[in-house]
Image: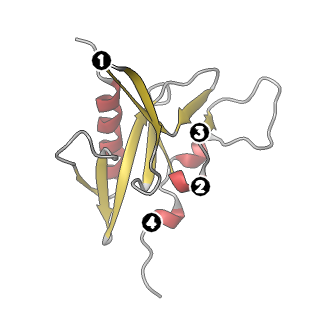
């Protein structure tokens, strides 16, 4: 039986988020704009999970949803107001990478290996995205 990549990515995200101390809630519908909800310290985060293999040393994700029906393939931009956190699971690194969708444009490249031309500027290193972004973590009131 062929694996369902999205469900495999969601499973890895659940494990990683649970290890980070989050309680996980699952939507009853597969048609919600998010795959799961992570709860910690009184804060809920709607999480969209993508499964992406590395290509040429990088993970590339476009912030859009795609589906097919009898009328063809459809693509729509992700509603960034309906998602608090993106999680990318990469089977090549067996790791989850997190980012706030409101902080990126229409796509994101996360670099796993150095570029062939040794470019260092404007590179988003995947290793820098293994934690939940600080602005999304719940902070205690001062």
Rendered image quadrant of residue 126: top right
Q: CA distance from mark 3 to mark 1?
A: 27 Å
- Residue at 24%, 39% (x, y): give it: 30
Q: CA distance from mark 3 to mark 4?
A: 23 Å
Where does label 1 land, which residue? 70
Q: Secondary structure at mark 2?
A: helix
**Residue 89 visible in image:** no
Label 1 neighbour load within 10 Å: few <14, some 14-19, many 20+: few
Q: Which callout, 2 or 4, points at the residue further toward the start of the chain?
A: 2
| Residue 141 higher or lower than 93, as above or below | below
- Residue at 19%, 43% (x, y): give it: 29
**Residue 34 visible in image:** yes
Q: Position of residue 68 (x, y in %)?
A: 35, 22
Q: Nearer the viewer, residue 22 or 77?
A: 77
Q: Secondary structure at mark 3?
A: strand
Q: Secondary structure at mark 1?
A: loop
Q: Nearer the viewer, residue 51 or 90?
A: 51
Q: Position of residue 37 (x, y in %)?
A: 29, 54
Q: Which mark is residue 107?
A: 3
Where does label 2 land, which residue? 103
| Residue 79 higher or lower than 40, as above or below | above
Q: CA distance from mark 1 to mark 2?
A: 35 Å
- Residue at 76%, 44% (x, y): give it: 122
- Disc 1 vs disc 2: Cβ atoms closer than 8 Å? no
Report the side of 43 relative to 101 (left or right): left
Where does label 4 land, which residue? 137
């Amino acid at each position: 039986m062929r694996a369902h990549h999205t469900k495999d990515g969601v499973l890895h995200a659940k494990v990683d988020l649970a290890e980070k101390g989050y309680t996980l809630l699952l939507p009853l519908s597969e048609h919600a704009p998010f795959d799961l909800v992570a709860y910690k310290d009184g804060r809920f985060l709607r999480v969209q999970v993508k499964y992406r293999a590395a290509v040429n040393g990088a993970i590339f994700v476009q912030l859009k949803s795609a589906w097919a029906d009898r009328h063809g393939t459809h693509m729509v931009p992700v509603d960034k107001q309906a998602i608090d956190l993106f999680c990318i699971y990469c089977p090549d690194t067996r790791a989850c990478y997190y980012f706030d969708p409101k902080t990126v444009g229409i796509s994101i490249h996360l670099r796993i290996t150095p570029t062939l031309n040794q470019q260092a500027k404007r590179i988003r290193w995947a290793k820098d995205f293994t934690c939940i972004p600080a602005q999304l973590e719940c902070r205690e009131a001062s």
